[in-house]
Amino acid sequence: MTDYLVPLILFVTTALALRRQERAYDLMLDGAAQGLKLLFTILPALIVLLTAVYMLRASGATELLSRFLSPFFSFFGIPPETAMLVLIRPISGSAALAVGAELMGRYGVDSTIGRTAAVMLGSTETTFYTISVYFGAAGIRNTRYTVPAALFADFVGFFMASWTVRFLY
Amino acid sequence: MLMSWIWAIISAISLCSALITGSGSALAGAIVQGAGAGVELAITMAGSLCLWSGVGAVMEAAGITDMLGRLFRPLLHTVFPSTKQDAALSRDLSGNICANFLGLGNAATPLGVRAAQRLKRGDTATNELCRLIVLNTASIQLIPTNVAAVRSGLGCQSPFDILPAVWITSLLSAGLGVTAACLLGRIWKS
């Protein structure tokens, strides 16, 4: 089903743009150029952060962390191997991408752990970054219950990512 | 500043645990490999990332954001009651949510910030502002293009087969997050 959905979205988007007399092809090229720019801005971070991820993995720290947090993660049915991803996700988007990509590469993209990492990345946001952008721009000092509620949403995301992958694949 | 500390802590942790587990040579090798892997990851992502930024630009021009906005309006009125009186706020908020939904992060943030400025009281976050931010931190995205790009870069045959799991997960996480915010809003004293 999802195999047809993505090409369908491509077609419908283009058709709607043409109906409005928009130059769909030129817009695609502009957007692609923007994507290239985005890639160049995150490339330095990816290089540094993947080095960090590889260092943590090679030194045995990743394994120690997941073994240490294993009881907590297993209790909720979240694979302990994703511990690093869960911890870094709310803080840094590119670090989470680096950790997630390493997990997918190590355990395989279609493995349970690889899929869980992908779903976690796809269905959560860089919570603390988003909060600081919004409150910074709006000049808010008293954030009240925003942080606990947002972290609760993240936790639901990590929990559900593990369980949906377990049931659907 | 935060990332500088994280980087320092990561190198300290790596050094310590390499000393404990005696994996010094592996650690030294990892430093070289990791930097190369960063470039490799960027290159494998490049194609899909650019293509989907292009599709995002067409979606914006095709008016899909406005169509979605009309679809979501009843829900918007329920979660953000102020939008019933304030048309400008309603427009910014639904633009923010729809742009996020389509993965247009660059378009979503300015709209969201403008809505946040209308929703605040002095320097305190109102209930509706807290809900807006929880909704923005919980990401409901139709097509998570970055992740799909990484998956296909790593040799996945059907990188989009995670979509149903992503939809269920992000809907529940955003829904329960906003529900928690609503409940907390009743008991939390400002």
Image (cartoon, coloured by chain):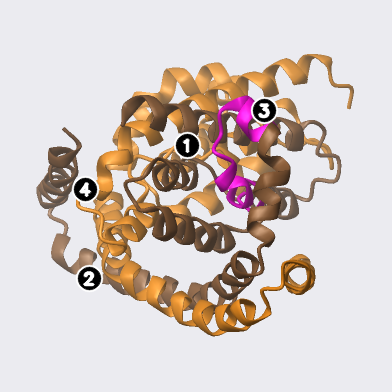
Task: Indicate which disc residue B22 carries.
Answer: none
Question: Which residue has dot 1 on it?
Answer: B91
| Percent coordinates x, y for residue A109 in the rendering | 34, 52
Residue depth check, mark 3 versus mark 4: number of the one nearer the observer:
4
Q: Residue furthest front?
A: B22
Viewer-nearest of labels 3 and 1? 3
On whether disc 3 and disc 4 are found on a single subunit, the reply is yes
* Residue with the mark numbered 2: A29
Tell me if residue A11 comes above or below residue A143 in the rendering. below
* Vertical arrangement, residue B157 with respect to residue B15, above or below: above
Residue closest to the eye, B7 or B62: B7
Q: Residue at x 64, y 57 (%)?
A: A62
Label ID, residue B128: 3
Residue B17 location (% of width, % of height):
75, 67
Query: Quick one: label 1 or label 4, which is nearer the N terminus?
Result: 1
Q: Chain of mark 3?
A: B
Q: In this rendering, does residue A23 appear at all?
A: no
Three-letter residue code for mark 4:
Ser
Chain assignment, label 2: A
Q: Report the magenta residues as a range.
A: A72-89
Q: Colour of chain A?
A: brown
Q: Secondary structure at mark 1?
A: helix
Tell me the crowding category of disc 4: few under 14, some 14 to 19, or many 20 or more residues within 10 angstroms, Cα based.
few
Asked which secondary structure carries label 4, the reply is loop
Side (left or right) of B21 relative to B105: right
| Whole-number angstrom distance, CA of label 2 to CA of label 3 | 38 Å
**Gap between marks 1 and 2 measured at Cα:** 28 Å
